[in-house]
């Protein structure tokens, strides 16, 4: 049986910096809620998604659990592991690479969430659960190509799990739950149809990718792919040090992301920006905060700066703007920096007096940013 060639290195991908940054930030903090990558074929969407999985550090899991339970967070354990612990069973720990789970467009609800064996439960009083895609993807990457062609109900299930971090299956009064926290990466070609606005809003971040027009960069792409196809192993070894550097940077950012601090001025900047742009709901505000904290951690900082908020807004707002084509919304992002300067000026002129002085609001946001 022939071996599959090694995955193309993430750091060898030419250009597409916005897409790569969105993926990296989700890798630092899965609670951000995933990324939707829109663009024509041949722009590196699937290559980047698969390369990210190889890049991420190994994780510790409870052995023999199909859900990849985190031994250090008992509050997130699946019902299976809780039962094993209650019986006094020793929970062994092992290390493994994170999983990259590819969801086919034809996937059904049962294939995604898993199934309960009702017959066995009634006859023997046992809960038997056949794990689905969400179980396999826990603490890993769930990749959905052509997400716009997936059944809307299935997309809802994926987005619900990505937001809640848990999958609960209930049948005939019997329930089973397991952790389902993953990096959701959806890709699509807008020429083949779009997602409903309600589903677009559920994706935390979005980027639009285009073919690179710069001749020098296109030549780099050609040379690298020729070298990769000629000798994949050697090509990967040539990029190994760059891959390790980025992997270490992501691991370090994961360690400090929960300690990244932000102030009321930062919260006001985010709230004023989304208010000025007439963004519906409050999901975008929370996404910007989480993404800004991850970006600060990526740069080794434990505090948020305006540059973090600006980058987060550029990733979180395009698909939520009430405008026409996606490209038009993308172009409007150029005004964000000017808006931030104006908001900062307002704050400095006493605008903070209009913001409630109590700390409950800030505490609530922190809790939502760190569920």
Image (cartoon, rainbow, N blue to C red):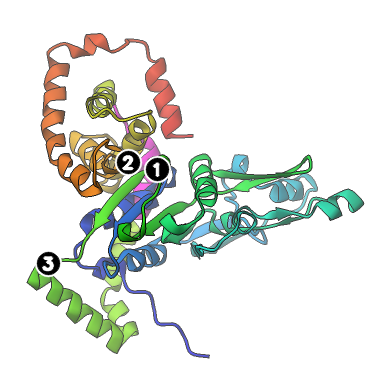
- Which residue is nearer to you in this view: 46 or 41? 41
Q: Which residue is mark 1?
A: 32
Q: Give the label, 3 or 1, closer to the camera.
A: 3
Whether residue 253 is in magenta: the answer is: yes
- Give how far across and how far down residue 354 sits, in percent: 25, 10
- Give how far across and how far down residue 306 sits, in percent: 19, 34
Under circle 2, the secondary element is helix
Q: Is residue 305 visible?
A: yes
Mark 3–mark 2 distance (CA, rounded to whole Å) = 29 Å
The mark that comes first in sequence, 3 or 1, is 1
Q: Main secondary structure of the magenta part?
A: helix
Image side of residue 266 versus residue 361, left or right? left
Q: Which residue is mark 3?
A: 213
Q: Residues within 10 Å of mark 2 (few under 14, many from 20)?
A: many
Rendered image quadrant of residue 39: bottom left
Image side of residue 11 versus residue 103, left or right? left
Under circle 3, the secondary element is loop
Q: Residues within 10 Å of mark 1 (few under 14, many from 20)?
A: many
Rendered image quadrant of residue 47: bottom left
Q: Which residue is mark 2?
A: 291
Magenta segment, which residues?
Answer: 250-262
Image side of residue 287 versus residue 347, left or right? right
Check if mark 1's residue and mark 2's residue have beta carbons within 8 Å: yes
Q: Is residue 23 visible?
A: no
Whether residue 125 is in magenta: the answer is: no
179 up-or-down from 368: above or below: below
The mark that comes first in sequence, 3 or 2, is 3
- Give how far across and how far down residue 150 sits, in percent: 48, 57
Q: Residue furthest left?
A: 215
């Amino acid at each position: 049986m022939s071996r599959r060639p090694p995955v193309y290195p993430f750091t060898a991908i030419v250009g597409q910096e916005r897409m790569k940054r969105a993926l990296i930030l989700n890798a630092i903090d899965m609670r951000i809620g995933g990324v939707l990558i829109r663009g024509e074929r041949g722009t590196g969407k699937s290559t980047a998604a698969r390369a990210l999985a190889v890049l991420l550090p190994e994780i510790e899991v409870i052995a023999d659990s199909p859900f990849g339970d985190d031994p250090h967070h008992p509050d997130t354990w699946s019902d299976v592991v809780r039962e094993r612990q209650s019986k006094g069973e020793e929970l062994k720990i092992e290390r493994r690479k994170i999983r990259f789970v590819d969801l086919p467009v034809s996937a059904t609800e049962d294939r995604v969430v898993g199934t309960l064996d009702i017959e066995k439960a009634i006859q023997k009083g046992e809960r038997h659960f056949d794990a689905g895609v969400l179980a396999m993807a826990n603490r890993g990457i769930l990749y959905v190509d052509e997400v716009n062609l997936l059944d809307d109900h299935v997309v809802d299930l994926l987005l619900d799990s990505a937001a809640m971090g848990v999958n609960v299956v209930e049948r005939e009064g019997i329930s089973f739950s397991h952790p389902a926290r993953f990096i959701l990466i959806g890709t699509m070609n807008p020429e083949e149809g779009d997602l409903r606005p309600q589903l677009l809003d559920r994706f935390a971040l979005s980027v639009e990718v285009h073919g690179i027009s710069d001749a020098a960069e296109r030549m780099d792409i050609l040379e690298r792919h020729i070298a990769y196809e000629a000798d994949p192993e050697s090509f990967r070894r040539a990029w190994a040090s760059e891959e390790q550097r980025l992997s270490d940077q992501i691991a370090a950012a994961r360690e400090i992301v929960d300690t990244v601090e932000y102030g009321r001025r930062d919260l006001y900047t985010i709230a004023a920006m989304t208010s000025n742009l007439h963004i519906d709901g409050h999901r975008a505000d929370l996404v910007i905060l989480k993404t800004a904290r991850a970006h600060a951690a990526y740069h080794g900082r434990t505090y948020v700066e305006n540059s973090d908020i600006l980058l987060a807004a550029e990733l979180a707002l395009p698909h939520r703007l009430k405008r026409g084509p996606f490209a038009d919304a993308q172009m409007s992002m150029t005004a964000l920096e000017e808006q931030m300067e104006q908001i900062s000026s307002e704050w400095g002129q006493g605008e903070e007096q209009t913001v409630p002085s109590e700390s409950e609001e800030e505490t609530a946001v922190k809790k939502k940013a760190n569920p």
